[in-house]
Structure formats: C-alpha cells, structure tokens
Image (cartoon, grey):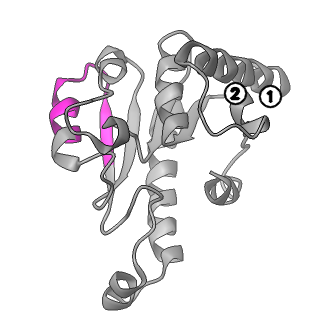
Amino acid sequence: MQRWKKHLEEVGDVETFDYPYMRQNRRRPDPLPQLIAAHRQALAEALAKTGATAPIILIGKSMGGRIGCHVALEEKVDGLICLAYPLCAMGNRAKLRDEVLRALTTPILFVQGTRDSLCPLDLLEHVREEMKAPNFLHVVEGGDHSLLVRKRDLNAARETQDDVDRRVLEALVTFANTQTLP
C-alpha cells in the first residue's frame, strides 16, 4: 500500500494505518471483528483530523479493501476503492469472500489485475452483477495481485509500470470525483 500512498498523495489527503497484528510483526491476521474494529478506529482518527465534512473514500489493498467493505456497512463513507480485492480465500475459487460485497450499498471501484489468482475476473463479474451497490471495474492487463505487470509484458506494450500506475490513478480520481460531487 505504501507504493499507492505515494501516488494517492499527488491528488489528495491520505491517511494510512497498520492493523495491530502488523505493528506487532505477527504473520497471522487478527480475527475479522478485530480487523474491523481497528479499521473503524483508524477512520474515526482520520475524521477527527480532517473534519467530518470532508468526503471520505476508503481505499485498501487486498485485505485492507475487504475490511474497508465491512467498515462501510457500519460507517458512512462516500465510496470504496479495492485494489486487488481478495475474492477467493487463498486462491480457492470455491471459497468466495463475496457476502460483504453483496450487502454493500456504498459505491465501489475494483482495480484488478488479469493475473490475480485471488480474484479471477469471471468470478468477480458474476458477483458484481448481483451486487446492490453501484460498482465499477478497472482492469490492469497482465497485473498480478500487487497490480504489477511482468517486465516482458511491459516491454511488449512499450510502456512502464509507471504508465500502468498512472492509468490506475486516473481511474481512482475519476471514481472519487463522481462520488464526492454535490
């Protein structure tokens, strides 16, 4: 997420945080209720800093996006952006993490790579069709779970990872602007 924090700071205020298990250098994530509580606390602290009148878009990479979706069920936010949403637990197509997505009403943008085994685009498309929330998708052609494209694919397309990231950032800005306009 640090790579994306740098990009996002070019367009607006960004507050980041680490979950308690990360701060304690543990590999195993905390149980879902604790992750949600930590995310809600970070949101409350960000709101206290910026003021409750500023538009709030929760952006998370992988698990951070998934937990942000849970938080949006409980807290008022203007939008959600999930960078590499982990739809399939441990890459298992039979273990979908889609219940929270189906319950959402908050507008959401998914940014997904075509080589991300944790979120096959065919499964995501099926879930998106059944979601209540307005939802959008930006595809990173050749992108993996970190939204990185292999060097050989970048060379073949005559572009750089910065070019790919710039297009992602443009999609994020467009989405955020459409969710926060009066």
Mark seen at residue 50: 1
Characterize the local packing of mark 1: few (<14), some (14-19) or many (20 or more) Cα atoms within 10 angstroms.
few
- Magenta part of the protein: which range? 124-137
Q: Is 10 situated left or right of 77 in this image? A: right
Residue 174 picture location, percent across and down: 46, 49
Asked which secondary structure carries label 2, the reply is loop
Residue 139 picture location, percent across and down: 31, 57
Residue positioned 40% across, 41% down in the render:
85
Asked which secondary structure carries label 1, the reply is helix
Mark seen at residue 54: 2
Question: Residue 76 magenta-drawn?
Answer: no
Residue that extends furthest to the top in the rendered view of this protein: 74
Residue positioned 33% across, 27% down in the render:
97
Residue 68 picture location, percent across and down: 53, 27
Question: Residue 126 magenta-drawn?
Answer: yes
Q: State whether residue 54 appears in this view.
A: yes
Q: Hey, what amino acid is under mark 2?
A: Ala
